[in-house]
Amino acid sequence: MERRNFLKQTVAGAAGAVILPTILPSSVFGKNAPSNRINVGAIGTGRISRDHDMAGVLKYDNARIIAVCDLDSKRVGEAKQLVEGNYTKKGIQNSVTIYSNYTELLDNKEIDAVLISTPDHWHAKPVIDAAYAGKDIYVQKPFSYTLAEGRQMSNVVNSTGVILQIGTQQRSMEQFRIACELVRNGRIGQLKNIQVGLPIDPSGAVEPEMPIPANLNYDMWLGNTPNVYYTEKRVHPQADYSRPGWLRCEPYCLGMITGWGVHHMDIVHWAMDTEHTGPIEVSGKAVYPSSGLWTVHGKYNVEARYANGVTVQISDEFPNGVRFEGSEGWIFVTRGNYSATASDPTSKKEGDKSLQASNPKILTSVIGPNEIHLYKSDDHHANWLDCVKSRQQNITPAEVGHRSTSVCIISHIAMKLGRKLQWNPKLEKFINDDEANEMLSRPQRPPYNF
C-alpha cells in the first residue's frame, strides 16, 4: 500500500533533466522504502509510551516515529531525544516534530498512524478524532473510561475503516493463545468456572495543593473531568517516569478492575468465544478509601455469569492470572516474569510457570488440523503495523477491546453499588435499574466534552 507519492515525485522532478547514473541504497526501493514506511505519531509520552508503545514501534524498520505530543513540555522534549537517539544508533537520520496539542499532530498529513498512550480519561476523544482524521490507531487499555465512550469509539472506528489495536498484548503471548485453544477445544471438558486474579492499589494520604509546573498544561490534562487543585501525586512525577498517581484517582482511572482486568477479561472472552458480548448478570463488592487523594478500590470481589452458564470470579484473593476450571480438569495461565514496564505492580516469583494444568498431558495435547486454531500473533505492535500495511483484521480490534473493557466497567458499577445487577449485553443496558444505567456515562467539563 502506497502511503505517499515519494516515487512519483522523484520521477517528476527528474523529467527533462539529464539523468546521471546513481547508486541508491536498497532501502529506497525495497520493502522499507520511504513510500512503504508507516509514519507514526505518539500521543502521550509518559511511562507506558517510553517503555512499551514507542519502544514497541522503534524495533521495526517498516515504521518511523516522526512526531511526539504531550501536555508536559519537559516530557515531550525528552521523548524527541529518546526517539531521535534511537534512530541515530541505527545510523538513521530522523527528525521528530514536537506537538503540545494532539489535534495539531492529527492535522499532519504525513502521519499515517498514532500511538495513544494517554491516561484512561483521555482515550475516547483522541481515538475518535484520530479515526475521523483517517489515522490508524494503537491505544492503551482500558479502551475507554465509561461504557458510553467505548460504544461511541467502536462505532466510529468501524465506520471509518481505520485499523485499531488495543494494547492487550497478552493476546500476542504464546501461553495465552495455547490456553485459549485448549479450552476452546474441550481439553478440560465442559467449562464451568473461571477465576481471574488481579493486583490491588494501596490508598494514600491527603496531598497538599501545589503550584502547577510551568511545563504542564494542567487544565487540558484534567480534560472533561472536574476542575480540582494540582498536586503532583494526582498527575505524574516530574522527576522521573515511575508509576503515576492518576492510576489511583477514580476520576481518571477506575483502578485495577479496569487497569489489569481488561488484560485478563480479554483472555476470558477469547477462551469462551464471547468476544462480542458480555455477562448477563454481575455482582460485586469492594473496599474504598475513606480519606486521602487516592480513591480507587482496594480489596474486591466480583462474580459475573454468562449466557453459556459459565461463572467468572474476579478477585485480588486469586493468583494473578486466569484459571479455567472444567468438568475434566483445569488450566492456569499468567504472564510469568513478563512486565510491560519496570514499575508494573506484579509479583515475579522465581520459578513461576506461565502455563499450568491439572494434568501435564493437557498442555502437550496437539490441536488437530480440523480443530479450532486461534489468531496467532508473536508481537502485538508488529501485528498492528503489519495490519496497517495489509488492511487485514488485527488481533484485538475495537469491538473486541470495547467488550473486554465494558465487562470491567459494569463490574466496577456493581462494586460501587454493592448489589447484583442484571445486564443486557446486546442493548448494553442494565435491566430495570436506572441508578446503574446512569453510571454508564458521566458529565463532561467543557471545552473538552464531546
Image (cartoon, rainbow, N blue to C red):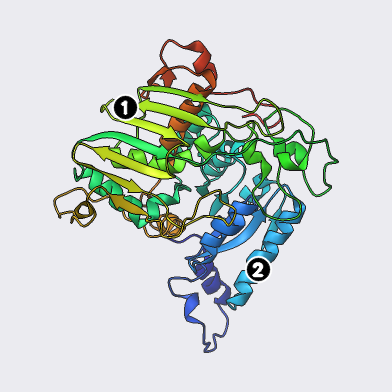
Left or right of 181, for residue 396: right
How far apart are labels 1 and 2 at the CA level? Answer: 49 Å
Residue 129: give x, y in percent of width and height: 58, 40
User: Compared to 339, does 317 lie above or below?
Assistant: above
Q: Amino acid at mark 2?
A: Glu
Q: Nearer the viewer, residue 416 or 80?
A: 416
Residue 443: give x, y in percent of width and height: 63, 22
How crowded pointer 2 is (Cα within 10 Å; few <14, some 14-19, many 20+) is rated as: some
Residue picked out by circle 2: 84
Q: Quadrant of residue 318?
A: top left
Q: Residue at x 61, y 76 (%)?
A: 89
Q: Residue at x 51, y 36 (%)?
A: 258
Q: From this viewpoint, which residue is outermost toward the bottom? A: 21
Q: Earlier in the sequence, mark 1 or mark 2?
A: 2
Q: Nearer the viewer, residue 445 or 391?
A: 445
Left or right of 40, for residue 295: right
Residue picked out by circle 1: 306
